Image: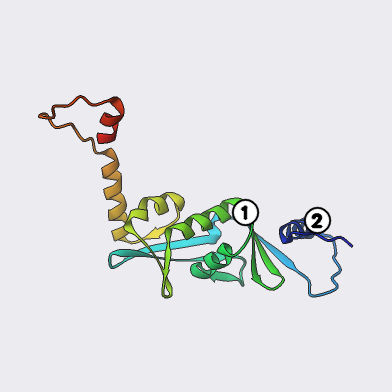
Amino acid sequence: EQEFPEAEESLELLLELQETGYILEWSDKPWTVTTVTKPQTLRLQASQNGDWFELQGTLSIDESNVLNLQRALEISRNSRGRFMELEPGKFVALSEQLKQRLSAVDELVEAQRKELRFSPLAVPTLAELDEELEVDSAFGEVLERFRKADTLQAHLPSDLQAELRDYQREGYQ
């Protein structure tokens, strides 16, 4: 009999044993761990809703288990490490990349009633985070404005009578 002080260590071992085909005996209800590694298991859709954007999506664990985005973020937020407990004894092991994507999305959105919303200022970050993101035309327009702003070259006014240091010139542009 082996005891592990941290649940994460136990879940890592359980995952390894499951993958190697060991048969485990349980004195109580058995724990199960499902692995979710493919980035496309997280699907996101963004659309404008007033002055904000709304984010919807799903996390597909397997054919029979699909979490809505808000629930997935809530479980992920309350989990330590890469394991999410869906219900007592039933865990999901996320890849490090998928866990990071969920955490990044969670930082960008705020829950407002039963929806997740984000500021237009988060559009470029969200677009960079998820190449498969499904968006509406308003999202695309905001993203295009940010891209144009990145290429904008500001010139110092001709009547400026000051000597700027290099970092000041860079900051102005």
Q: Residue 105: x, y in percent?
A: 47, 58
The residue positioned 17% from the left and 26% from the top of the image is 162
The image quadrant of residue 29 is bottom right
Q: Nearer the viewer, residue 44 or 103?
A: 103
Residue 56 seen in the current view: yes
SS for callout 1 = loop
Three-letter code for the amino acid on which mark 2 is drawn:
Thr
| Residue at the front extreme of this rendering | 162
Whole-angstrom CA distance, mark 1 to mark 2, is 18 Å
Q: Is residue 156 left or right of residue 38?
A: left
What number of labels is visible?
A: 2
The image quadrant of residue 114 is bottom left
Q: Which tag is nearer the camera, tag 1 or tag 2?
A: 1
| Residue at the right extreme of this rendering | 1
- Give the number of the disc on residue 151: none
Q: Is residue 13 left or right of residue 161?
A: right
Three-letter code for the amino acid on which mark 1 is drawn:
Ser
Q: Residue 47: x, y in percent?
A: 35, 64
Q: Residues within 10 Å of mark 1 (few under 14, many from 20)?
A: some
Q: Which residue is mark 1?
A: 95
Q: Which residue is mark 2?
A: 20
Q: Quadrant of the C terminus?
A: top left
Q: Quadrant of the N terminus?
A: bottom right
Q: Dots 1 and 2: beta carbons under 8 Å?
A: no
The residue positioned 23% from the left and 26% from the top of the image is 164
Answer with mark 1 or mark 2, whichever residue precedes in sequence: 2
The residue positioned 62% from the left and 66% from the top of the image is 62
The residue positioned 80% from the left and 59% from the top of the image is 4
